Image: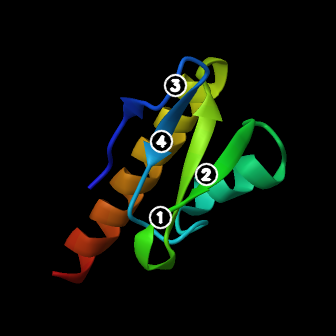
Amino acid sequence: MIRLFEESMCSREVYSGFPSGEFSAVREALEQEKIRYRKKKRPKGRESILVRRRDEAQARKLVQLQINHLWREKMRKC
């Protein structure tokens, strides 16, 4: 679902395979420029967000919090 891997010496891919901005916590951080990033186009119109290494921990935490939130919402509906 979420892949964290080194893209280059200065950036890492935080999430892949989701439409850009699907994770609201990450989107807010990007909009407020709390995380420096660039977008990378993927097949089928998808995008990946590449973040600077120094922002990786914060971005990873935001993504994990959002996954936890989505999981809790899903469990509530069952």
Query: Dot 1: few (<14), some (14–19), or many (≥20) neighbours within 10 Å?
Result: few
Q: Earlier in the sequence, mark 1 or mark 2?
A: 2
The residue that label 3 is drawn on is 8
* In this view, the mark in front (2 or 3): 3
Rounded to the nearest angstrom, the CA distance separating label 1 from label 4 is 14 Å
Q: Earlier in the sequence, mark 4 or mark 2?
A: 4
Query: Dot 3: few (<14), some (14–19), or many (≥20) neighbours within 10 Å?
Result: few
Residue at 48% across / 35% down in the picture? 60
* Residue closest to the eye, 59 or 19: 19
User: Tag on residue 14?
Assistant: 4
Compared across the picture, whether 53 is left or right of 7 comes to right
Amino acid beneath label 2: Val
Compared across the picture, whether 53 is left or right of 61 comes to right
Rounded to the nearest angstrom, the CA distance separating label 2 from label 3 is 21 Å
Q: Earlier in the sequence, mark 1 or mark 4?
A: 4
Q: Could you tell me residue 30's position as x and y percent?
A: 74, 49
The residue that label 2 is drawn on is 26
